[in-house]
Amino acid sequence: MKLCVIGTGYVGLVGAAIFSDWGNHVTGVDIDEKKISRIQKGDMPIYEPGLSEIVLNNIKEGRLKFTTSIAEGMKDAEIIFICVGTPQSETGAADLSAVWAVAKEISNHLTDYKVIVTKSTVPVGTNQKVKEIILENLKSDVEFDVASNPEFLREGSSVEDMKDTDRTIVGSESEKAFKTMRRLYEHLGSPIIECDLRSAEMIKYASNAFLATKISFINEIAQICERAQADVSVVAKGMGLDRRIGSAFLNAGIGYGGSCFPKDVAALYKTSTDQAYDFKLLRSVMEVNLIQQFNFINKARKYYGSEIHGKVFGCLGLSFKGDTDDIRESVSIDVIEHLRGLGAKLKVYDPEAMENAKKVLGEESIEYCKSEYDAATGVDALFVLTEWSQFKSMDLFRLKENMKYPVIFDGRNLLDKSAVEGIGFTYFAIGKYTNGVKSIHEKNDVYSSAVLKNGH
Ligand code: UDX
């Protein structure tokens, strides 16, 4: 099939690459000339395992090309995918200006039947409005259909996710559009849910909100586990083996981040209030997510008797999760900024996100290190902030030798409690009654309420 993909962010670039890898002829479009010329050389603007090879190979095979012109990209395409960004606006709602602009531009060049598909995450009713904009701006009486085809890719594993999807959602009002979309996806063998436009749009938000709810739920269970001397990892394993619950997204930590969950949860909450409904559960999910990082920082504040000023901390992980260089809404960055605000000096390391982090964090009180061992050298304590697998297999003896004091605050439960404690570290994890927690157990929880009152 001939396809056009507008927008070369995570969704668009991975989508264009994989569609072409399936044998389709794909033109990727972006207004950013620099980005397009980088991609054409195989220099990916994002770090995504496996992506560069697929892009280069399909360019070489003549199935994948890129342009800055929508008119050129959509010329022979049967399907046009809109994959532009929908960032969070000041009200919490998604900013749809890029979607509207692209819809208008498409209508200017529409000369034969095409299916116009929104893949960007957009609130209920957006596809209907896309249809109206195109109808209003059409230059001739030409037939078209709109469809909603939300994407469920996770950064860091998006290439695999796209090939091995659990389901494909297609919302439309037209059997002709369903047929066209089936031709693209049915070879995957996984279920295709065909539904109305609005339900398709809701499926995406409801899915992300549910996963965020799972994370906030286990994070609250972790709070109780810690106080009740249970182990949240064991509890999550025991819960997850129940097929009705499932084991995914039950890893307790310092809260969810990234370009999707915070934005999508806020947007769904906004949709609920727009519909005169207060989605109370979702409000709590967001609140718990914020409190989770303060609870983590408070452990250090309690341990040091609030004397954080002048301490040197090693921080492992800057990206919002492992296997990505993306630092958007990264809780690791928030924690680092908070520790810096308390007067700590920080030695930071991330396998991929150093450059991105530098742009946001700057140089003040921060040393950018070459490795996890470098970041641990001479520090008062080590903070594990992002779930990179290489941090899991660190040489604990080497770490201990490098550090000034053997203290670890593990915000992702990456390390093995008995191994770490066995070597003589004072260890703090999430939702585990460790020797570190024991040492501060008797102290009153004065800081969390003070911090929250100050609105941090
Ligand atoms: C998410 C959705 O998973 C994906 O379907 C959607 O298309 C885009 O948003 P992504 O943002 O790439 O994907 O990351 P994800 O793997 O879902 O993790 C989001 C955040 O939750 C990360 O900060 C991660 O550290 C955190 N997380 C995830 C947890 O704290 N615990 C978990 O068990 C899982």
Image (cartoon, rainbow, N blue to C red):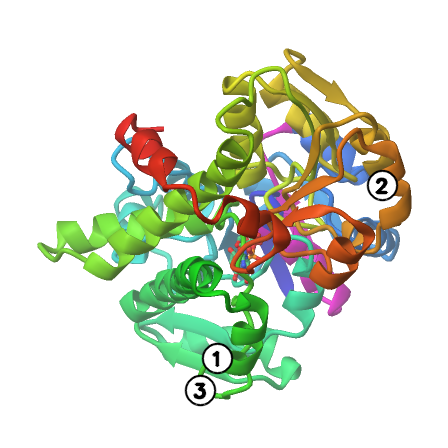
Of badges 2 and 3, the one in the foreground is 2
Most distant residue in the left direction: 276
Q: Earlier in the sequence, mark 2 or mark 1?
A: 1
In this view, the residue in front, 302 or 244, is 302
Quadrant, the C terminus = top left
Q: Which residue is mark 2?
A: 399
Q: Which residue is mark 1?
A: 179
Q: Earlier in the sequence, mark 2 or mark 3?
A: 3
The total number of labels drawn is 3
The amino acid type, in three-letter code, at marker 3 is Arg
Q: Which residue is mark 3?
A: 244
Q: Residue at x 81, y 32 (%)?
A: 403
3D distance between C-alphas at marks 2 and 1: 58 Å
Q: Is mark 2 within 8 Å of ligand 1?
A: no
The amino acid type, in three-letter code, at marker 2 is Leu
Q: Is residue 29 left or right of residue 239?
A: right
Q: Residue at x 31, y 67 (%)?
A: 197
Q: Earlier in the sequence, mark 3 or mark 1?
A: 1
Of badges 3 and 1, the one in the foreground is 3
Q: Which residues are magenta?
A: 11-32
Of badges 2 and 1, the one in the foreground is 2
Whether residue 203 appears in magenta in the rendering, the answer is no
In this view, the residue in front, 20 or 373, is 373
Residue 158 falls in which quadrant of the image?
bottom right
Q: Dot 2, how many residues are within 10 Å of its Cα: few (below 14), some (14-19), or many (20+)?
A: some
Residue 2 visible to the viewer: yes
The amino acid type, in three-letter code, at marker 1 is Lys
Q: Is mark 3 within 8 Å of ligand 1?
A: no
Quadrant, the N terminus = bottom right
